[in-house]
Amino acid sequence: MIRKLILAGVFALAGTLAHADEPILGNWKTASGDTANIVSCGGSNYCITLKTGKYAGRKIGTLAGSGEAYTGEITDPSNDKTYSGSGAISGDSLKMKGCVLKILCKSQTWTRL
């Protein structure tokens, strides 16, 4: 019985540690100087919420992926328009990109806090 409990604990911890290594997780300073928090929101999905600034508390995106490349949707909090989005990590930088029809795109780089 104790052996089963220990094994269950080890598997639970291993799953948590593997997920904690995902580089997109954490707090990021946006191009406007606000803080965005990226957390896991099920499976390989990551939710982006602004923590500071005029739009604090507002969810501004959901991305999916792993490692250095992520895709999903990004919402501009100033006009509530949602765009096809992506994120690419390089060191402590996260390049966020939002596009309309995949041809009209805007990018900005966030830095890890």
Image (cartoon, helix red, strand yellow):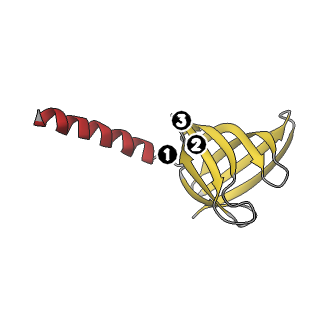
Q: Residue 112 carries which label?
A: none
The residue at 43%/47% (across/down) is 20
Disc 2 is placed on an element classified as strand
Left or right side of 23 for 56:
right
For disc 3, the marked residue is 44
Residue 71 screen position, x and y as percent? 67, 37
The residue at 69%/53% (across/down) is 58
Q: What residue type is labelled 3?
A: Ser
Distance CA(mark 2)–CA(mark 3): 7 Å
Left or right side of 49 for 83:
right
- Disc nearest the viewer among 3 and 1: 3
Residue 2 screen position, x and y as percent? 11, 37
The mark nearer the N terminus, 1 or 2, is 1
Residue 87 screen position, x and y as percent? 67, 45
Asked whether the viewer can see residue 24, the reply is no
CB contact under 8 Å: marks 2 and 3: yes
Distance CA(mark 1)–CA(mark 2): 10 Å
CB contact under 8 Å: marks 1 and 2: yes
Asked whether the viewer can see residue 52, the reply is yes
For disc 1, the marked residue is 22
Badge 2 density bin: few <14, some 14–19, many ≥20, Cα 10 Å: many
Q: Which quarter shows the C terminus? A: bottom right
Q: What residue type is labelled 2?
A: Tyr
Disc 1 is placed on an element classified as loop
Q: What residue type is labelled 1?
A: Glu
